[in-house]
Amino acid sequence: MSKRIVCVACPIGCEIDVQVAENGELKISGNRCKRGYEYAKDEVTDPKRVLTMSVKVEDGEIELVSVKTDGVIPKKLIPQAIEFLKTLKISAPVNAGDVLVEDLLGTGVKVVATRTVPKRYHSKLEIQA
């Protein structure tokens, strides 16, 4: 099997060729650095991604806060991670940089808020209603 990928490990964007022999041995060419080699190897054997999405905020000025993982997680875990984060509800206030999940699905990767959501203050009219 042969696969051509564009490396995203650095701004150069090398076009890397990966050939996988029947015994699983990899032949990688086209990378200009070690990071490119490692990226290509991982992309073929165990692809990983940073996950970004939104999480519900209770009693916040807005209903959602944007979040992202502070590192990469296996691509195969992304559907499970999305389902988990869809059930999460965070109480306002939330500050950019707050760690909302310490260890996402046993990966050791944190989920971090990427924006601030202040607590919603109720007006007297809302309280009386």
Image (cartoon, helix red, strand yellow):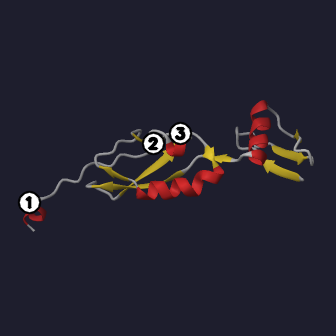
Distance in Å between CA atoms under marks 3 and 2: 10 Å
* Mark closer to the observer (3, 1): 3
- Where is mark 2, residue-wise? 112
Residue at x 78% of width, y 47% of height: 44
Upstream in sequence: badge 2 or badge 1? 2
> Where residue 90 sits in the image (x, y, percent)?
34, 50
Distance in Å between CA atoms under marks 2 and 1: 34 Å
Residue at x 76% of width, y 36% of height: 38
Position of 18 compared to 71: left or right? right
Upstream in sequence: badge 3 or badge 1? 3
Q: Given the current orientation, which residue lies at the most extreme right position?
A: 22
> Where residue 58 sits in the image (x, y, percent)?
29, 55
Residue at x 74% of width, y 33% of height: 35
- Give residue 69's mark: none
Question: In the rendered structure, which amino acid carries the disc numbered 2?
Answer: Val
* Mark closer to the observer (3, 2): 3
User: Is label 3 in contact with label 2 (beta carbons under 8 Å)?
Assistant: no
Residue at x 53% of width, y 53% of height: 81
- Give residue 109's mark: 3
> Where residue 75 sits in the image (x, y, percent)?
65, 51
Task: Please tell me whether mark 1 sits on a helix, a strand or a loop.
Answer: helix
Position of 10 compared to 70: left or right? right
Question: In the rendered structure, which amino acid carries the disc numbered 1?
Answer: Lys
Question: In the rendered structure, which amino acid carries the disc numbered 3?
Answer: Val
Distance in Å between CA atoms under marks 3 and 1: 42 Å
Dot 3, crowdedness within 10 Å: few (<14), some or many (≥20)? some
Location of the C terminus (image quadrant): bottom left
Q: Is residue 11 above or below residue 64?
A: above
- Give residue 124's mark: 1
Task: Please tell me whether mark 3 sits on a helix, a strand or a loop.
Answer: loop
